[in-house]
Image (tube, grey):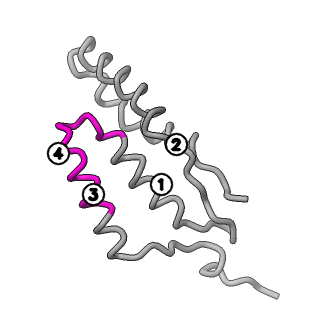
Amino acid sequence: MKRRTDELLFFDGGLLQFIGWSILGILVTVLTIGICYPWALTMNYGWKINHTVIEGRRMQFNGSAFGLFGNWIKWLLLIIITLGIYSFWVFIKLEDWKARNTTFAN
């Protein structure tokens, strides 16, 4: 029996949830003058990843804002030391951190 691809790979998050989490992330970032930006990122990553199913298995995001905050400070210092050059690598480092904190749910 042939399996349909759309049954094995899908995203089940809703538009209103996306809008709500996005607004909350923006508000938290603005109200804390950017200090809680890592929390906003982990909140949004968690929502996206936790609503993703691959090969019939739900994904789970295990990252924490505290864990990202330490990296965020390190990356900020490296950006300052290298006069901004390291900022080109921050996106890659952030994607790597996100991948390392994503697993399949039990």
Residue for badge 2: 63
The residue to which callout 4 is attached is 30
The label nearer to you, 3 versus 1, is 3
79 magenta-colored: no
Relative side of 24 to 60, left or right: left
The reply to whether discs 2 and 3 touch (Cβ–Cβ < 8 Å) is: no
In the rendered structure, which disc, 2 or 3, sits on the residue that comes first in sequence? 3
Distance from the alpha carbon under mark 2 to that under mark 1: 8 Å
| The magenta segment | 21-38
Q: Which mark is residue 46?
A: 1
Looking at the picture, which amino acid does disc 2 mark? Gly
Q: Amino acid at mark 4?
A: Val
- Answer with mark 4 or mark 3, whichever residue precedes in sequence: 3
Q: What secondary structure is the stretch in magenta mostly built from?
A: helix
Residue depicted at x 31% and y 31%: 88
At x 67% / y 84%, what residue is drawn?
4
Closest to the camera, between mark 2 and mark 3, is 3
According to the image, label 3 marks what residue? 24
Binning the other alpha carbons within 10 Å of mark 4 as few (below 14), some (14 to 19) or many (20 upward) gives few
**Cβ atoms under marks 4 and 1 closer than 8 Å:** no
Tell me the CA gap for discs 3 and 1: 14 Å
The three-letter amino acid code for the residue at tag 1 is Gly
Q: Nearer the viewer, residue 37 or 11?
A: 37
Label 1 element class: helix
For discs 4 and 1, the disc positioned in front in the rendered view: 4
